[in-house]
Amino acid sequence: MSTQRLATVLMGALPILFVLAIWQALCSFGFAPPSLLPPPGKVFLRLAQQLGSLGFLDDILATMIRLFAGFLIAVVLGVGIGLAAAVVPAINAVVRPLVQVLAPLPKVALYPALIILFGFDHASKITLVTLDALFPILLSTYYGASMVEQKLVWSALAAGTPRWQILFKVIAPAALPSILTGCRIGLVISCIVVFLAEMISSTDGLGHLLVGAARTFQTVDMFVPLITISLLGLMLNGLLYGLRKYLLRGFPEV
Amino acid sequence: MRDKVRKLSSPSERRSTGGRMQVPLRPEIDTGTGATSDERARAMIEIDRVSKRFETSGRKSHLALADINLTVNDGAFVSILGPSGCGKSTLLYIVGGFVAPSEGVARMKGAAITGPGPDRGPVFQEFALFPWKTVLGNVMYGLRQQGVKRTEAEAQSLRLIEMVGLKGFEHFYPKELSGGMKQRVAIARTLAYRPSVLLMDEPFGALDAHTRTRLQNDLLNIWERDRKTVLFVTHSVEEAVFLSDKVVVMTRAPGRIKEIVDIDLSRPRVRAELLLDSRYQKYVVDIERMIDDGRDDAEHP
Ligand SMILES: Nc1ncnc2c1ncn2[C@@H]1O[C@H](COP(=O)(O)OP(=O)(O)OP(=O)(O)O)[C@@H](O)[C@H]1O
Ligand SMILES: [Mg+2]
C-alpha cells in the first residue's frame, strides 16, 4: 500500500522533473542567455535563501491570508447560494439571471473600483479572489444539488425526515462530490487571481515581489515568487485532495 | 410520537411475542382468501378510483394510470404484475405519497395519503442507499429519524443486519457491496423503522436467479414473522405466485387492473414443494396467459 502510494507520487513528480530538465537544458546549451532565463539551480538556491529572510516570509504570509480569506468566503457563499438556488425555486429565479450576467464578466475589470472602495490592503484583493472563485463553486454546487437522485430524497422522507432537513441530510451530502470539484477549480483560480491582484497594485505579497524584481531586471528574483506560488498551489491542492478522499470515501470513483 | 418510540425500543420483545402470536393468526389467513376472512381482515390500503396523468414535454399529456380500484388488507402480501410502462411504479409511488394522483384518492387505514411517512416503507429497484453512509449508518438512519437513541438504534440495526445475513459488513460502504448485498441493506434500512406497509418495486429485478431465490425465501421468512402488509411489484409470474396472497394483473398503458387472482396456497410455503404442486403450476400458467392475452390485444386492436 505505502510503496504503491510512493510510486504514484513519483509518477506525478516525473513530468515536473521533465520540465525542470528542459529548463536546465535551455540554460546549459545556451539557448537562453542567463540574464533572461536563470538556471533552475540558481532559482531554487535563491528560494532557499529567501525562506530564511523575514521579509520574504511576510510576503508569503500576506499572499496566503488573501488567498485563504478570498477562497473560504467564496466557498461559503458559493455552496450556500448554490444549495439554496437548487432547493428553492424563488431563489433560483433571482440567482440564475444574475449568475448568467456576472459569471462571464472579467472580474479583474472591477479591480480598480475595488481599490477605490476598499483601499490597497487586503480587502480589495480578498474581494477580487472571492469574486473569481465564487462562480465555479456556485455552479458546480448548484448542478450537483439539482441532480441528486430523487429516490434518495424519497427514502429519507419515508424514513421520517422532515422536509426542511432534507437539504442537510440528503442533498448537501449527495452533492458533495460536485461541491468539492468546484472547490478545487476555485482554489486554482484563487492562486492565479491573488497573484494577479498583487502584481497590479500592492505594497507586499508574492505578486508585488515579482513586479519589483522585473522592474530592476533581477531575473532570479523574478522566478522565486513564481516558483513559490506554484509550490503553494501544489500543497493546497494536495491538502484538498486528501480532504476530498476522506470525505468521499463512500462514493464510487474517487 | 412517544408511543412510536416505545414500540420501537423493544424490538426483541415485540419480535418474539409476535412470533408466538402468529400461530393462532396464521390459520385465519391460510384458510384463505374466502369471503369470511376478507370481511374480518381490516383494509390497510384503499386505492379509490385513482388516475394519474403526466404532463410530458412536447407531446400531449400521458395517461399512466386509469381508474384503479384496489384494496389491500392488513397483513396481506399483494403482487402487481403487468407489462413495462403500465404504471406499476407510479401506483406504488402514489401509495408511498411521493406522487399525487391526478384523480381519485389513496387511503391508508382510512386516512387519505398526502405525503410520505414512516408507516409506508419503500424499497426501490435502484437500492437508493446513501453512498456517504456505511451499511450500519444506512440501516440506523430511520431509527435515528424517529428519535431513537444512538446506542439503542445501533443495537437494533446490528440485529437487523445480522437477520438479513450481512453480519461482518456493518462498516462497509454501499459501493463495496454486491448487488444482492445492497438490496439486503435496502430492505433492512426500510424494515428498521418498522413500517406497517412495505412498498417493494421490483426489489429482486436486478439480481441473478440464485440470489433472487435466496432473497425471496428470506423475505417470506421475515414477512411470516412480522406479518407486514406488502405491495410488491415484479415482472416474474413465478415470484408473484410464490410470495403472494393476491396477484394483481395490469393492462398495457394506460394501466388498468385487468384481473385480481387470489393465490390459495398454504403457508409457510416451501419452494421445493411448491414447484411440484400442480395448483402452483396452474396459477403460473393461468396468469402468464392473462398477460399474453393483453399483449395480443395490443398488437391486434
Ligand atoms: N415523471 C414522469 N413524467 C412523465 N411521464 C412519466 C413519469 N413517470 C412515469 N411516466 C410515464 O408513466 C408510465 C408508467 O410509468 P411507470 O414507471 O409507472 O411504469 P412501470 O409499470 O413501473 O414500468 P416498468 O415495469 O418498466 O418499471 C410510463 O409510460 C412513463 O413514461
Ligand atoms: Mg417500474
Image (cartoon, grey):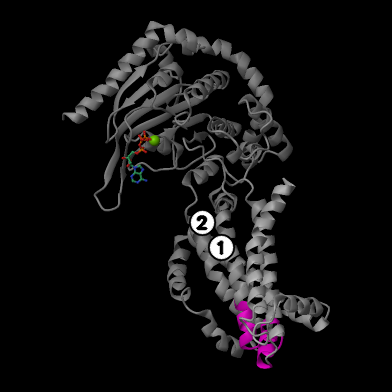
> Split into 4 quadrants, where in the image is the N terminus of chain A?
top right
Badge 2 vs badge 1, beta-carbon distance below 8 Å: yes
Element type where label 1 sits in the image: helix
Q: Earlier in the sequence, mark 2 or mark 1?
A: 2
Q: Which residue is mark 2?
A: A144
Element type where label 2 sits in the image: helix
- How many numbered marks have been drawn onto this rendered protein structure? 2
- Side of B63 where A224 appears, left or right: right
Q: Residue at x 65, y 56 (%)?
A: A11
Q: Which residues are magenta?
A: A193-216
Residue B8 falls within the magenta-colored stretch? no
How far apart are labels 2 and 1 at the CA level? Answer: 10 Å
* Amino acid found under the numbered disc labelled 1: Gly
Q: Is residue B63 visible?
A: yes
- Side of B141 where B59 appears, left or right: left
Label 2 marks which chain's residue? A
Q: Point out residue A51 in the picture as x, y percentages from the top left corner.
A: 80, 77
Q: Residue at x 46, y 21 (%)?
A: B76
